[in-house]
Image (tube, rainbow, N blue to C red):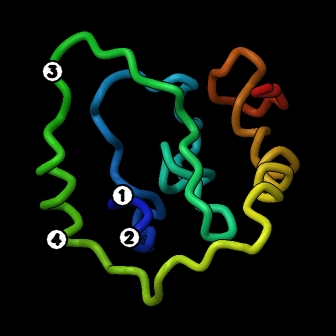
Amino acid sequence: MLRVLFDVPDDPGYMPHIYVGAPYPKKPEDPKSVPRFPVLLLDDVPLMLVSGYLLAGEAEHVESHVDYFRKNGRLRAKPLAPTNDPLGVYDQFERSFLWVFTADGSSGDGGGSWS
């Protein structure tokens, strides 16, 4: 939720990493390519890009992110205003962002499919 309520910081150009395990699919190599990872905000429609995380230990507490955004965050200037064609966002995602992931779900420059 925090990744949608706040603007992406100019420096470093992406949201802080979430330490809750290894995401599937993996995060992209360049965090600026999907700056809110694991969320993608497309036409003000938030899309969750991961199906889950593999955790072998204790996850980071959400309070650390609340503290980060409290200190460094800049709230969005206006509320989300999703498109009138929310299902069309999927087509736009498929055309524009699947390059972030390879066919095996790892990050990279492949053009794999999620279907």
Identify the element where label 2 is drawn.
Answer: helix
Disc 4 to disc 1: CB gap under 8 Å: no
Vertical comparison of 51 with 39: above or below: above
| Marks 4/1: CA–CA distance | 14 Å
Looking at marks 4 and 2 on the same chain, the residue that comes earlier in the sequence is marked by 2
Q: Which residue corresponds to the image point at 80% horizontal and 25% vertical from the top-left?
A: 115
Q: Which residue is mark 1?
A: 1
Q: CA distance from mark 2 to mark 1?
A: 6 Å
Which label lies toward us, 1 or 3? Answer: 1
Give the residue number, with chain letter if any, for mark 2. Answer: 5
Amino acid carrying label 3: it is Glu
Mark 4 or mark 1: name the one nearer the start of the chain.
Answer: 1
For the residues bearing labels 4 and 2, Cβ distance under 8 angstroms: no
In the image: residue 67, left or right of residue 115: left
Q: Quickly name the residue at label 3.
A: 58
Q: Give above or below for 113 relative to 34.
A: above
Give the quadrant of residue 25. Answer: top right
In whole angstroms, how far apart are the C-alphas of marks 1 and 3? 21 Å
Find the distance from the CA under tag 3 to the CA under tag 4: 23 Å
Amino acid type of the residue that numbered disc 1 sits on in the rendered structure: Met
Q: Residue at x 23, y 66 (%)?
A: 69
In front of the other: label 2 or label 3?
2
Q: Is residue 112 left or right of residue 15?
A: right
Q: Quadrant of the N terminus?
A: bottom left
- On the rendered structure, is 36 left or right of 108? left
